Structure formats: structure tokens, C-alpha cells
Image: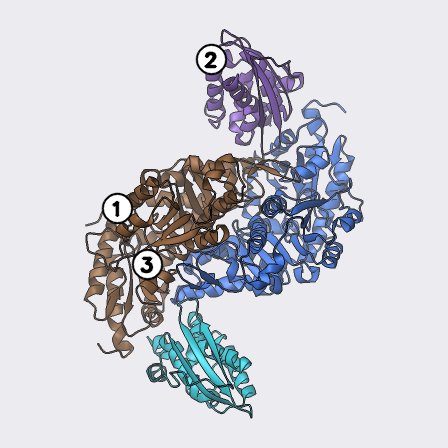
Chain colours: A brown, B blue, C cyan, D purple
Amino acid sequence: MPALDAGALRADFPILAQSVNDQRLVYLDSAATSQKPQAVIDTEIAFLAQTNSAVHRGAHTLAAEATVLFEDARARVAAFVGADEEQLVWTSGATAGINLIAYSIGNATVGRGGSDARRFALAPGDEIVVTEAEHHANLIPWQELAARTGAVLRHIPVHEDGTLALDAAASLISARTRIVAFPHISNVLGIINPVAELVILAQSVGALTVLDACQSAPHVPLDLPALGVDLAVFSGHKMLGPYAIGGLYGRAEILDALPPFMTGGSMITTVTLDSADYLPAPQRFEAGTQPVSQAIALAAAVEYLDAVGMTAIHAHERVLERRMREGLRRIDGIRLLGDAADGVDRVALSAFEVQGVHAHDVGQFLDARGIAVRVGHHCAQPLHRRFGMTASVRASASLYNTEEDIDMLLDGVSGVRSFFGVTA
Amino acid sequence: MPALDAGALRADFPILAQSVNDQRLVYLDSAATSQKPQAVIDTEIAFLAQTNSAVHRGAHTLAAEATVLFEDARARVAAFVGADEEQLVWTSGATAGINLIAYSIGNATVGRGGSDARRFALAPGDEIVVTEAEHHANLIPWQELAARTGAVLRHIPVHEDGTLALDAAASLISARTRIVAFPHISNVLGIINPVAELVILAQSVGALTVLDACQSAPHVPLDLPALGVDLAVFSGHKMLGPYAIGGLYGRAEILDALPPFMTGGSMITTVTLDSADYLPAPQRFEAGTQPVSQAIALAAAVEYLDAVGMTAIHAHERVLERRMREGLRRIDGIRLLGDAADGVDRVALSAFEVQGVHAHDVGQFLDARGIAVRVGHHCAQPLHRRFGMTASVRASASLYNTEEDIDMLLDGVSGVRSFFGVTA
Amino acid sequence: MSGLEGLYQELILDHSKARDGFGLEDADGRSADSHQRNPICGDEITLRVRVDEDGAVRDVSWEGAGCSISQASASMLTGLVEGMPRTEADALIAGFREVLRSRGKLTLDEDMFGDAAALSGVSRYTARVKCAMLAWVALEDGLSRA
Amino acid sequence: MSGLEGLYQELILDHSKARDGFGLEDADGRSADSHQRNPICGDEITLRVRVDEDGAVRDVSWEGAGCSISQASASMLTGLVEGMPRTEADALIAGFREVLRSRGKLTLDEDMFGDAAALSGVSRYTARVKCAMLAWVALEDGLSRA
Ligand SMILES: Cc1ncc(COP(=O)(O)O)c(C=O)c1O
Ligand SMILES: Cc1ncc(COP(=O)(O)O)c(C=O)c1O
């Protein structure tokens, strides 16, 4: 038995009391965006109704209080991923975080930044390595960076069972490799990738490592410094927090050397009409008014996650994962994407197709029963192509899902083919 | 008498009921960030507690409802600035909007985008014209773009009275000028700049116009297509809306031709491991999960502004403006920045110095009386330098400020010099 | 589950399997192709149409994969516009779009839309409107180029 | 307004006008300069310090503009560290920083900090801590390079 009582936690999430199509809402789309506990909503409202004011810019009482709350939130969220506050840059989300890194490296390549930025400059023929399992957010920014700099993009293949081809990675990552970017957990496969192995490969050739921690932050205990990556990104809205906020973690030495990305107010020391001097990290990367109320609410979200306990959450989701996967395997005509052996550690997320029925139709059928899943390519077209599909159905659970939710999903999926008149 | 009863409106803003240092809060820092009416807060909560779900990505009921609310919000906010929904790109704020434009032009310069993006490419020696009155957000991104492309940055000077030197602009803007970027209203001077004249000058040489509408959107009726600018930006948090959301307006022809800035999910049609095809605007510029609840709440904010009426708001703020300025002129040892003649149209914002007392000390003194003003360079160092200062005190009012608020400010400022022992 | 059965009427499920017009006809000088894609699910359609000398729409044929709504919609469209004057087809497409975007407020007239009138229910499912529109957008685009 | 008078004690207002140490002394081989800036208000200070052969801090002098807190703090610091062993000055700066960052929880000991103890109140004004620290950061930086 897991130490977590998901049935009790549900009461903290107002939306889960909704009924959808006259059915109890079974929300299995947390990999797209998570639901928010009342504590997170209340924290943001309290800020807006009592303290709201511009941070880092005013001497008046509200401004000073807001600044303290905002910086405390940074320390809190940094601690959640095992980091120090100076190692956490606020972004508007994971996509913005990866773009920040890619543009900053692009800027270093055209000579921006100080002398310590030179080490990031790319030369034509330099290689950037990603995986075949990327979310578009960790793929297209690197394609664009490659196109701007003449670097070459390469990719680590995915085995039929969804695990990364580490042997191929070992030969792909070479002296020409400058950047290795990969997901901690793919949003389609749900498998926890071997970060340590990839970091060792990258470090052995002096390449920069970039971890997409979007799908791990809400589900597994995270210690980014211990993982040894140089940079990592995550999104608030996937981890019980608000939209429009995310974090970029970086080793201090890396953040301090990277040139700015967006420029504007609050990231400078001296500005003349012709040029500007920049503050150190993290402020250097935080141009303009920051997502203040969202940062403070995200701190409340990680507070909530920590109170439940990330170890308990992972254990609970493992139970759900096994129930979901074993159940799906038993249903006729189901093909799971990346159905790795049971020993492989994963989160409670399964993408699958129902043979003979389009994913959209499956989703619609489940929706009529109050079950919310996601259908489509989940921003991972290359991965779907690798499995010979254009779209799949994805069910993804979180701490607030119960075994009953999984059973309702399985029951629903069992009825799909007969409704659409597909015979086995 | 203005048609607007600010005393009554105050009740809609929960924070204004706060007391600060045992005094009633007199919030005169709206140019930094505005306060939010309960209706805006409630709209965002209702979405999070009832509909929250990923937009543009799911077929389930909540996702569909969320998508409708999100796209309706786009149409609503676009209408507020006189535009169509396809002309409005969501950004995380004005700073992000200007960076988007500058990076997109930088991308066009290195050959990214379609053949119609070529027209934006900059060549060494091409000129970008800004004003001496820029907020750093509308200055540094252009400095960086110039540094990356070899373009040259020039600036339109500001007269001692705060008005732009239009005669100088006419000779500065030449056949070499490719971009003219300027504020509708400077956040230090409060003067409404002559947009029409600058647009004519820019159009006569075929230059792109970029308007920083941050300080006009909450205070004056805005019709961006009628103003004739090519692109414009504004920030939600300055116009009664949430943090982390803003708008980029663009003429359709311009938006469709500009290359993407950030890349990732939801802005593509087909993605392979090596390259991606992009959606048309506005989606092309909206990579990753969008600020969904914030967009919906921003629509509620412009709904609120429109219900009060932008014409009534401007009329009310004109009354406050005159009272503030005339009152400040009467106090010994006050020097106003950009004290233009009374005929010049402006918003209720004054920046000033109290001779012999540092701005920080003035702000602290006022704060003890519950009066929140901003002190510092207000992200406009070059403008302060032009007036021979490093910092000033800025009082900025909004629709919820009363004449009594202004009188309390004036009373407070009158007492500063004697408290700090400065003799006239 | 009346909602679901309202959306997936027998007629729709039947058309989604029958797929009238499936398989591209040979191209000639009077035919035009249109390729359309639904960026959300990656579904695509290639539709070919000829316009006669007298301005009549002829020989709509198509290929592609997609959900039952998109397949049924393409199938229903095929027979409906055969022989119709091009201007009338354009008006039909505009009318179809208006109803589908009405969020359940309008319904498709059976006399005018034939089997396709069964797609009325889709308009209440905003996320599925793109599926139903895919073939119609392809026809509109094809006609503009034929 | 007891809060305000707690912050702006007579001693602070006096020092902000007297400005002990204002005006840079001539530089020599044993002196080092530090230039510091408060990015929020643009205030700056240039501080010069010499370290004797025996390791004693000598002749702190400074120039710059700023609010009364920053000017008073620089003025108070000047006399306080004159002749102090460098290591002791470093410890003093660390102690000052700790109190100022304590958000009103700690106070500066008068025996140790002399007139500068009047700056204790600043620690409750988080936005002003940088003002009070400016000269001390400059001294710390100068000592590390002298
Ligand atoms: C005139 C002007 N432009 C740009 C900005 C930047 O806006 P934001 O910080 O919301 O990105 C501001 C506000 O700080 C402003 O007043
Ligand atoms: C693995 C992964 N990476 C990146 C992203 C992008 O995150 P966001 O859309 O919040 O920027 C997502 C979510 O959509 C994801 O699942």
C-alpha cells in the first residue's frame, strides 16, 4: 500500500469535484497540465489582494514585502530541485527556458557576452545531440540554433521498447559534440531515462548537458546538482503551479558565463544610449517585470508537493502505472508505445493506440464518460513517426488520481472498439 | 467634474482597503504595476477551479472549453486595442514582445523565415532609431540587435520640456533607417507622443514602426490600426491584468512575414528530426504552453476598463494630472522632469526631484505616510542622465486614484525638506 | 451517452468506413489538388477536384487518414458537390463553415447538405470542428486553383 | 511616524551631511580602489583604502552620491576601521552584513560598530539594505585587492 491517500488529496483540488458530461471527472491529462490545489490558488490571491507591487524597484512598504516574498519563492523552488537560489532563473515555462539556452549560446557564437562566453560559441560542424523522444520544445530550438550557426543536429534513437539506445549514444557523442540535450522523462513514453550515463558520456567529451525535467519535476524526487547536468528546465503549470512560470536551473559557473537572452529592465547595472552592462545570474536572464504572483504561487505548489512527499508520490504513481499498463495489455487491439519491461522505472503515463479506431475518436468516447485523456502527437511527431503512427491516446496520472480512476479508464478503453464497430 | 467616480471604483480593488504603516494606502505606483479589481481575480480563479485544462491540444470537454475561453480572450483583448484576433500575439509582457520583434528581425537577417522575411534583414550600416526617452525594454533589445547585425542605433533627442525633438527626428530618419521604435508615453515623462508624425516620417522612408504602448494602454483610448504603426506591445500587469501576460499587435502582413522567435510545441504543422514547418501568425509566435488563465483574466481586465470607459478614464486622469503638477510646481525646491506646457496632452504621472534630498529618502518619507511612489531611474537611465540626474521620485495615478490621493501626496512632499533638514 | 450518439450517428460511422471518393482519380489539365493538415493530430488529406468548362464541379476524389469525423465528412462531401456549379459549391462550403463554427447554435439543412447534415452535431464539439472541416477546406482551396 | 524616526536617527542625518572621509586621498602603491553601484537607483561610490605593512587598514576615503543612508553609512565606516587589522575589518563587514540581512531580527552592537550601530534600523527595510551596504561592500572589495 502506498503511503499516500489520493482519495483524500482530491478534496484539495477544487476542479476534481466537477462533473463532466454528467460523470465524475476522471482527469488523466496531467502530463499536459496539472490541476491546482486550493492552497496554490489562495496564495496567489492573497498576494494580489494584499501585497501586490513591483519587485526590486521600489522602496515603499508593499514593494519591499513583495520583493521578499518573490525572492523567498525563488529559494523555495530552488530547494525543491536541490539547488541554491542563485542557480534558479525564472522563465515563463520550459519552452522559454530551452529557447533561452539556445539563444544565449547563439549570442555567444556571434561574439556577445564576456570573454568567458567564448567557450559556448559554436562552429560549423560542431554537433548538438538530442534524442528521438524529444518534445518539440527540446528539438526545434536546437534545429534553429543549428541553422543559425552551421552546427549539425544528431539524435539518439529509441528502441522499440521505448528505452534510449545507449550504445548508439556512446558512438554518437564524440569530440565534435558540444551540447547533449535530453528529456528526463519523455511525455509519451513515461520512462525515466538514465541521466547519469548520458552525463558521463557528455562530460567525457566536454559537452554541455541540458535536461528537460518537465515530466519529472511533478513525479519523482529531483536533485539536479546531484544529477550532474549543467542546465535543466521545468514548467510550473505541470507541477501544480500557475501557468506562465517555469524554472531554469544552471550550475553557477555556467549561468555566470552565458550571455543574456532577452534584455530590458532590471537586468542591468549601467545603461547608456549605446550600450548596457549586465547583472550577474540569475537577474541577467530576467529582463522586465517578472511573473511575481506566479513565482509565489509556484513556491506554494512545491510546498504542497513536499508536504505530501515526492517519494510517496512516486511510489503511489508506480502503483497506478502498473495497474494501467497491465490493464491495457489485457485489452484486445491495444498497442502501447514503448512498452518497456517491468523492471524499468517509470511514471504513471501510457500512450497507446486502439487498432482500427482513430485516437481522436477514442478520446471523444472516453470524454463522454468523464475521462479526460489527450489525443494527438503530443508535440512529439518524430517519436510517433518512429512507431509508425501519427497520433496516439495518452493517459497520464498524478498524485490526485486513484486506482478507481485507472479502472474507469480501462473499462472505457475496453468499450471503444465495439462502439465504433471494429471487429477483432 | 469627471464622469468617473474613483471613490466608488476603489471598492472594486481589494488591496486599496489595506493600511500601510497604519495609514490608508495611497497607491501612486501604477506605472510600475497596477492593482487588480476583484473581477479579474475572480475570473482567473473560476477558470482554475472549473475549466483548467490544456488548450489547443485536447479533445476532451474541459480542453475544448478552455480553448474557447482562451481564444475568446484573444478576440476581446484585440478589440480593446482596435485590432482583429489574428493580429494579437500573446507574450509574457512588453519586454518579451520587443525582444520577440528584435530577435525575429535578427533571425530574418541570418536567413531564417520564408522569402517574404528577406525584407526585414538588416545590413551593416542600416539604422535603427529610438528616442532618448526609452524605457530600457525598448532600448537594449535594439542595442543587442545592432551589435549582432552591424546596424547602427540612433536616437531622437528630448527637449528640456520633455517633448520629442521632432525637427531632429525629421533629419535623423533617413533612407538608411529601417526601424523606428518609440514609446507612446514615456514612463518618466507622461507626455503622449505624436505617433502620427513619427509614423509619417518612418513610412516616408519605408521603415518599420514599433510602438511601446505600455503606458498608454491603461490610460487612453487605443486604436492601434488607426495609429498606423506596424507593431506595438503592451503588458497586462500595468492594465489591471495579471503578471506574465502581454500583447504584441502587428499588422497582418508584417506578422505573417516575420520568422518565428521562440520555437517548440503548438506553433508547427510538421516536424521531423531535422526541421519544422511553422503555423501562420499568431500561433507561429506562441511556442509552448501559453499563459492561459492569465489571458482569460486579462480579457476580464479590459472588460472592466471598457465598462468604466477609456474616455472617462483619460478625462479623470487629466484632472488628477493637472492637480498633481500644479501642486508640485508650488512646492519649494521641486524640479519636475519634462514639465511641458499645459496644452500638451498627458497622463497622470510626474517624475521629480526634491532638491537636496535623495529620491530614496523622499520615497521612504512618503511611505511612512502610506503613500507608495517609485524612486530610482525607472529603467530609464539615459533619460535621467539627459536631465542631469541619476534618480527621481515618480508618482503615477490610475482610474482608482482620487483627488484626495493627490492632495495627500502634495502634503507629504511639502514636508520632505524640513524633515531632512534641508534649508531653501 | 446521448451526446456521444448524437455526434457519432450511424450515418457518420457508415461513411467513415465506406469512404466515398477514396483513392485519387487521375489528374488532368482541369484538375487541382489541395493538401491540408490538422496540426493538432497530424491528420492529413489530399483532395483532387476538376472543374468542367461549364464551371461544374466534377470527380472529387481524396486520400488521407484521420478520425471517423474527418473521413465521414470527406466521404459525404464527395457525392454532394458532384456536378454542382462552382459558385454554388463555394457558397455551400461557406454555409457549412458557418454552421460548424456556431457552437451548436445552427444546424445543417438536410435538403441542402444531404448526408452531411448528420455533421451538425460536431459544431458543439469545438475541438472536432477542424476534423469535419478538413475536406471542405481542401475542396475550397482546390476550387480556387482549378 | 516612529518607524521613520527609528530609521533616520539624528546620527544618521548628521553623518549624511558631515560625510567623514569624503574626497579621495592620493593613491599610492599600497592603496586599492573599489567602485560599487546600486543598480536600482544608480547610486555609486568609489572607495579607496590603504593597507599598511603591518596589515592595518588606513586612510579610507570615498566619493559618490546617494541617499542619506548610503552617505551616512560610508561616513560612519570611515572612522570605524581606521587602524584596524585587515582580518578584523573583514569580520566586521561580515557581521554588519549578517545584521542588515536579518530583517530586523538582529541589532548592531554599539561597542563594536560605534556610530554605525545607528544603522540597525535599516535591516527592517529590506529595500534599503543595499544602500547601507554599498560602502561596506566597496571596502570589502578594496581590501581583497589592496
Ligand atoms: C514604457 C515602458 N516600456 C516597457 C516596459 C516594460 O514592461 P514589462 O516590464 O511589463 O515587460 C515598461 C514597464 O516597466 C514601461 O513603462
Ligand atoms: C517533456 C516536455 N518538454 C517540454 C514541454 C514544454 O513545456 P511548456 O509547454 O510548459 O513550455 C512539455 C510539455 O508540454 C513536455 O512534456
Question: Looking at the image, is mark 3 or mark 1 earlier in the sequence?
Answer: 3
Q: Is residue B323 left or right of residue B260?
A: right
Residue A312: image tag: 1
Q: Where is residue D6 in the image (x, y as percent from the top left)?
A: 57, 23
Residue drawn at 46 percent across, 64 percent down: B67
Q: In this view, does B371 lie to the left or right of A83?
A: right
Q: In this figure, which residue is indicated by the disc labeled 3? A: A188
| Amino acid type, mark 1 | Ala
The secondary element bearing badge 2 is classed as: helix
Residue B23 seen in the current view: yes
Q: How crowded is mark 1: few (under 14 residues within 10 Å), some or many (20 or more)?
A: many
Q: Where is residue B114 in the image (x, y as percent from the top left)?
A: 55, 62
Tell me the CA gap for discs 2 and 1.
49 Å
Q: The numbered mark 2 sits on a residue in which chain?
A: D
Q: How crowded is mark 3: few (under 14 residues within 10 Å), some or many (20 or more)?
A: many
Q: Do the residues labelled 2 and 1 touch (CB within 8 Å)?
A: no
Q: How many labels does the image show?
A: 3
Q: The numbered mark 3 sits on a residue in which chain?
A: A
Q: In this figure, which residue is indicated by the disc labeled 2? A: D88
Tell me the CA gap for discs 2 and 3.
60 Å
